[in-house]
Image: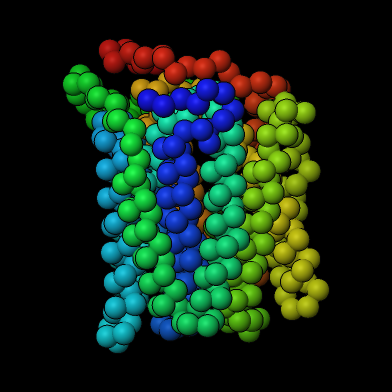
Amino acid sequence: MQIPSKPDSPWRVPDFRVLFSATALSQLGTNVSYVAVPLIAVAALDATPGQVGALATLSTLAFLLIGLPAGAWVDRMRQRRLLVCADLARAALFASVPLAWWLDALTLGQLYAVVLLNGAATVFFDVGSQSVLPQLVGRGALVQANAAVVSLMAASNVAGRGAGGGLVQLLTAPVAVLCAAVAHLASALQLLAVRRRETERGPAPVQGLRAQIAEGVRHVLGNRELRALALTAAVSNLGSQIVNTMLPILFVRELGLPAGALGLYWGAGGLGLLLGARLARPLAARLGFGRTLAVAGLVLAPAALLAPLNGRGPWLWIAGAGWVLAMFKIGVDNVLGVTLRQRMTPDDLLGRMNATFRFVLTGALAVGAAVSGLLGELVGVRATLWVGAALLAVAFLPVFLSPVRTRRELPRQQATMTVSRTAPR
């Protein structure tokens, strides 16, 4: 394993640079498809709010179906091979959409299948990439490494979603989806350059799969700080998904704005994420880890209540400013929260810890999409936006009311800790 000579220098590790560049390509594909796929449903297939909600639900449903066992599987698998296979699967799935469109055979059913299977591949990619990161850079470099990755994801939100909206407007949504497929293929090829020798996996543990999953769940839910981080992130995801699911309908159908405007709006949110990620480390150094999370939530989370005011003219800018501030808060949370949970978890449990968080967090996205579609049909788009914004405004409370608020430093490194395989934690 290659560890940088300085604890805050992940860039000294060649494999981290490879993982970072591959993640950039993968995130570009993810964000372009994030804009293009629902716009295909709305503009080309005349999808209703309920159908758009179903599409968004299926895109994250895999985390509920296989999210927990995926963690146990990742802990036993060769992670580079896993990441490559996941990206190749996503490239093939997205390539099928423009092919069907050109053959005049594209249906909502195919879109449903593509986003569901893409979600399954994303489960393994996300859990695997978060689990391999501490092994590549060492735990002393996790804050800077996570800040770099979260900043990259936020920048990809800006570039990818902005590019997605522009590609849809200029070249049609199916061509934009093809570009997403090419980005995932390029990511898979880049990951082949990772040289880190895979850690030899020991013999299969005595525990069955269910017991291994339960061990990871107990680790997260049995710790007050990890539990609070999970609850805050889950409510944030629930609220943001309720809002984001209705935005294509609001922008394109109700406000009559071009696809590029939606891409720019989502891109502005990505800019907020980027700024939050970049400033998380200096803020934590000045205020302390826990206080930064608490203050960011208390001051910035209520700005989400401006999002439902979206409209033409100045209201678009006011709502956009609120969305940027809300996403800034989430950018801070992502860097500090992910680092904290990685530092509080032994190497043996990283896959299952990450899978448990992904199950809860992305499960909240699936629920949020379903709720958004249902509310959109029953009470309308505007009322649904208010529900999502209200959840975002109060999402910080679990962390604010937990011991996380008083934590100034990261916990001691646990890189060498071994989890018992014979007794529950």
Question: Considering only vertical position in the picture, is 203 above or below 319?
Answer: above
Residue under the point 33% across and 13% down:
420
Snapshot quadrant of residue 174: bottom left
Quadrant assignment for the N terminus: top left
Please indicate, yes or no, whether residue 340 appears anywhere in the rendered image.
no
Residue under the point 46% across and 25% down:
3
Question: Considering only vertical position in the picture, is 102 above or below 166?
Answer: below
- Horizontal side of 196 relative to 314 (left or right) equals left
Quadrant assignment for the C terminus: top left
Residue under the point 27% across and 50% down:
85
Please indicate, yes or no, whether residue 188 appears anywhere in the rendered image.
yes
Question: Considering only vertical position in the picture, is 244 above or below 284?
Answer: below
Residue 41 at x, y = what percent? 43, 76
Q: How is the image coloured?
A: rainbow
Residue 306 at x, y = what percent? 75, 61
- Horizontal side of 406 relative to 375 (left or right) equals right
Snapshot quadrant of residue 399: top right
State the residue lying farthest toward the bottom: 104
Could you tell me how many numbered marks the image carries?
0
Q: Give the camera-side residue of 124 and 300.
A: 124
Residue 380 at x, y = what percent? 60, 72
Residue under the point 28% across and 64% down:
92
Q: Give the camera-side residue of 193 and 26.
A: 193
State the residue lying farthest toward the right: 314
Q: Give the camera-side residue of 186 and 322.
A: 186
Question: Considering only vertical position in the picture, is 15 above or below 33?
Answer: above
Residue 394 at x, y = what percent? 68, 45
